[in-house]
Image (cartoon, rainbow, N blue to C red):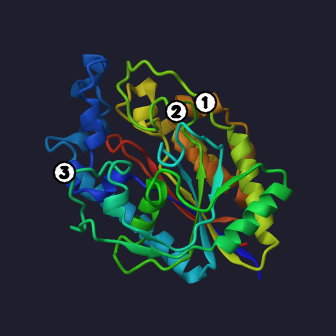
Amino acid sequence: MAEILGLGLTHYPPLCVPDAEMASPLSWTLQDPSIPAAAKDLKNWPAAMQSEWAEDFGTKAAAEHRRQLVAGFDRVRAALDAFRPDAVVIWGDDQYENFKEDLIPPFAVLAFDDLDLYPWHHAQASSMMKGRANVWGEDASKHYHLRGRPDIAKDLVTGLLEHDIDIAYAYKPLHHASLGHAFTNAILFLDYRRRGYDHPTICFPLNCYGRRVVSAKGFMTRMDAALDFDPPSPSPKRFMQVGAATARVLKESPWRVALVASSSWSHAFLCDSTFRLRPDTPADRRLYKAMCDADYDRWRATSLKALEDAGQQEVLNWFALAGAMEELGAPLKWSEFVETHIFNSNKVFAVYAAA
């Protein structure tokens, strides 16, 4: 009998590295000559940001940030294991990994068969891990034999097309050797304790980066970089419609499926109003309150411009999840907002009641 579980998590790449390197995005940004010196002067930072950065460039704060994130992953993993899904469907952003100049779909379902996922070999560039040690001390031989469910994926694509969602699909990677980092890191972090990960998984990449997916290669640039912007991503409302249609299709199926949003929230490196030094926490807090209040109209009314101005492009993954949970009437059982000024993005975890 169909049953659907909703989960939300982060795939923050620097969680992979030791504490002393976790604030590396901010360290890189502080070297940007196009950012005013006054903005980079620690004396002008919010007190909480100064406290996190301290005299050790965030190393002590990183240990606490890691503790909070691992606790969130433990909570989400426990809910996932207890649910015993037939498949895990992950919504994640493709940051110039398989979505490149030859094809930028708005969203796609990867109907892959089983594959061998080598996180420290396949995702060195896209996970900011090139030339860096990981916190587990693993080498390039570390891998997961990731089980796929192409049968469920193809039925999902069929159902979405029948529900007027013009969805792309693929049977094998186009450019990236296996999975982009939004999916790879979600699996790595769900298995942070290294107990293994055996849930069949279907990746559902979304074009969250829109104007920056090719022009900025979905990543960090200097603030004064002259970018030839790409066309935008679909609207937040459209992502909710995709999520709602996904829920309707799966609800008509015989499977137990976990729907997962994989991303952090406002990203400092996308937020010009803070000179790319810290995330837009007030915008994140407003959206988070609406999520906790099940105020889906507030989410639906969010404009793409407002979302981009706040550096919340990746939260579009959560808009898909919100659309699905609204469609199912699934209540939020537990959530956590992990706030930070120096670790690039605020992070949110969520577990919805199965519906």
Report the Cα–Cα distance between label 2 and label 1: 6 Å
**50 lies above or below 247:** above
On residue 272, the disc is none
Circle 3 is placed at which residue position? Answer: 20
**66 lies above or below 341:** below
- Residue 168: x and y in percent read 69, 51
Mark 3, secondary structure of its residue: helix
100 sits to left or right of 85 = left
Q: Specify the amino acid type for callout 3.
A: Ala
66 sits to left or right of 11 = left
On residue 310, the disc is 2
* Mark 2–mark 1 CB contact (< 8 Å): yes
**For the C terminus, which image quadrant?**
bottom right
On residue 306, the disc is 1
Determine which quarter of the picture holds residue 332: bottom right
Report the Cα–Cα distance between label 3 and label 2: 27 Å
Label 1 environment density (alpha carbons within 10 Å; few <14, some 14–19, many ≥20): few
Q: Specify the amino acid type for callout 2.
A: Ala
Q: Residue at the spot x=40%, y=74% of the render? A: 144
Residue 353 or 242: which is nearer the viewer?
Answer: 242
